[in-house]
Image: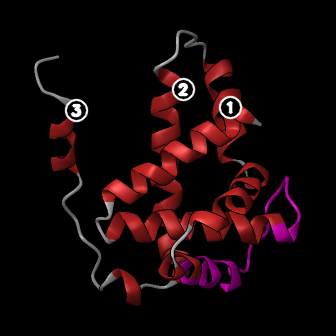
Amino acid sequence: MSESFTDAANLFVFPPSKSPHLLNPLVLAYIGDAVYEVYIRQFVISGANHRPNHLHKASTGYVSAKAQSKLLEALMPMLTEEEVDMVKRGRNAKSGTTAKNADVLEYRHSTAFECLIGYLYYKQSFERLKEILDFALAHKQNA
């Protein structure tokens, strides 16, 4: 591989049509879900076991609504006021759908977490986003 992974940032060149503050929280959760999923998949693939079933099971331990809800609970004390406001917007958003394997509260908290991730991503607060994503890994490994 001749290109570094930092060059991959050039792939993501489509900014949102509005300021992140003005985006619907479900839109932020939509992109936040994708950002978090890619981060977790990269982490899982960095390990030695690349069997598809193992990759899926390992990823699910991080990206399920239940796991994200527990993560958000642990994360709350370290969030800024602005981040807490974004979490509340995501939690209170009415999506009209329900999770298959989670209760309503877990699903709402999961959406709130994804909203925060999407917000930080579109705000280009990449250092803070990385802190939170790294916290997610550490939290799961310490659970």
Which disc, if any, is residue 5?
3
Label 2, label 3: how many angstroms apart (C-alpha)?
16 Å
Check whether the beta carbons of the residues at disc 3 and disc 1 lie within 8 A of each other: no
State the residue at coordinates (66%, 42%). 139
- What residue span does the magenta drawing correspond to? 85-105
At label 3, the amino acid type is Phe
> Is residue 2 within the magenta segment?
no
Residue pointed to by mark 2: 44
Please indicate whether residue 16 sits to the left or right of residue 31 in the image.
Answer: left
Q: Earlier in the sequence, mark 3 or mark 1?
A: 3
State the residue at coordinates (15%, 39%). 7
Secondary structure, mark 1, is helix
Q: Earlier in the sequence, mark 2 or mark 1?
A: 2
Mark 3 or 1: the one toward you:
1
- Residue that lies at the very extreme toward the top in this rendered image: 48
- Residue that lies at the very extreme toward the front in this rendered image: 77
Mark 2 or 1: the one toward you:
1
Check whether the beta carbons of the residues at disc 2 and disc 3 lie within 8 A of each other: no
What kind of colouring is applied to the model shown? secondary structure
Counting from the top left corner in percent of width and height, residue 87 is at 60, 76
Q: Determine whether 59 is above or below 51 in the image.
A: below
Residue pointed to by mark 1: 141
At label 2, the amino acid type is Val
Secondary structure, mark 3, is helix
Which disc, if any, is residue 24?
none
Counting from the top left corner in percent of width and height, residue 143 is at 77, 37
Counting from the top left corner in percent of width and height, residue 135 is at 56, 46
- Residue that lies at the very extreme toward the left in this rendered image: 2
